[in-house]
Image: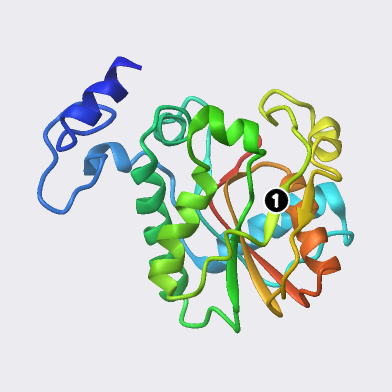
């Protein structure tokens, strides 16, 4: 906690090792970022995302395209940074991750016919507790990078759910069911759904189901990281 508070006062030092950042570095130095375990290619990331979600949902949750930047490992440097982003008020890290994710998607050459971007929403009580939704901040950076509209108003979380952290795979699958609701308004034909970390895909599946029921023909997924079984 102290390290995160210090970073608010001294933003030009690495969040993890507290060394002074070099020109071009943001939040974390290159040495610490080297431990983030990025995917080597777009196809590798999408393939692993499909296998992960398929292992829990089979063909019940089919998405059009999928993008992830990193593999998520417990007790890793990436986990520390994502924890600071999510719980310690460093929401600008989320915007930075969103921009990186957008650059990663554009480097693939074809992002398809995405109409709009929607972040997985927090329940209003949880958003008040944290003061912001980290997934929405990621989506902000992503929308700016891709020059696509961010639909903040489209999807809401109507039911308060406990954190997915610490739940079993079966509990994770049931926890977000029925938690989301579509507000009135047109839904784009192809929606890009954004979250911070995908573990089983249960949250994405529940949100995507509501978007499809509201008229979306295709839903694609984007996340900073994909959890790896260890």
* Left or right: 104 in relation to 149: left
User: Which image quarter: residue 188?
Assistant: bottom right
The extreme front residue here reads 184
* Quadrant (top left, top right, bottom left, bottom right) of the N terminus: top left
- Residue drawn 54% across the image and 78% down it: 111
Q: Nearer the viewer, residue 203 or 49?
A: 203
Number of residue marks: 1
**Residue 156 visible (yes or no):** yes
- Label 1 environment density (alpha carbons within 10 Å; few <14, some 14–19, many ≥20): some
From what the image shows, is residue 12 above or below residue 97? above
From what the image shows, is residue 3 above or below residue 98? above
The extreme top residue here reads 2
- Residue drawn 82% across the image and 60% down it: 209
Q: How is the image coloured?
A: rainbow
User: Which image quarter: residue 142?
Assistant: bottom left
Position of residue 189 measured from the top left corner of the image (x, y, whole percent)? 71, 80
Q: Nearer the viewer, residue 68 or 141?
A: 141
- Residue drawn 81% across the image and 69% down it: 214
* Quadrant (top left, top right, bottom left, bottom right) of the C terminus: top right
From what the image shows, is residue 55 above or below residue 176? below
* Left or right: 219 in relation to 94: right
Position of residue 136 measured from the top left corner of the image (x, y, whole percent)? 52, 51
Position of residue 225 measured from the top left corner of the image (x, y, whole percent)? 53, 47
**Residue 39 visible (yes or no):** no
Q: Which residue is mark 1?
A: 156
* Left or right: 189 in relation to 79: right
Position of residue 175 measured from the top left corner of the image (x, y, whole percent)? 81, 35
Secondary structure beneath dot 1 equals strand
Q: Nearer the viewer, residue 158 or 145?
A: 158
């Amino acid at each position: 906690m102290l390290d995160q508070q210090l970073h608010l006062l001294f933003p030009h030092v690495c969040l993890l090792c507290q060394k002074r950042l070099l020109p071009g570095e943001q939040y974390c130095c290159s040495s610490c970022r080297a431990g983030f375990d990025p995917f080597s290619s777009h196809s590798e990331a999408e393939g692993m995302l499909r296998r992960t979600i398929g292992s829990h949902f089979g063909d019940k949750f089919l998405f059009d395209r999928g993008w992830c930047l990193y593999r998520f490992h417990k007790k890793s440097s990436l986990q520390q940074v994502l924890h600071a982003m999510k719980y310690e008020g460093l929401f600008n890290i989320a915007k930075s991750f969103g921009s990186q994710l957008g650059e990663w998607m554009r480097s693939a050459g074809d992002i398809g016919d995405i109409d709009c971007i929607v972040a997985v929403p927090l329940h209003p009580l949880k958003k008040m507790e944290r003061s912001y939704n980290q997934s929405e901040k990621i989506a902000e950076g992503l929308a700016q990078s891709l020059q696509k509209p961010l639909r903040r108003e489209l999807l809401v979380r109507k039911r308060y759910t406990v954190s997915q952290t610490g739940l079993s795979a079966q509990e994770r699958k049931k926890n977000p069911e029925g938690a989301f609701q579509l507000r009135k308004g047109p839904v784009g034909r192809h929606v890009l759904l954004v979250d911070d970390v995908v573990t089983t895909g249960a949250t994405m599946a529940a949100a995507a189901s509501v978007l499809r029921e509201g008229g979306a023909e295709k839903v694609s997924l984007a996340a900073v990281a994909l959890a790896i079984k260890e």
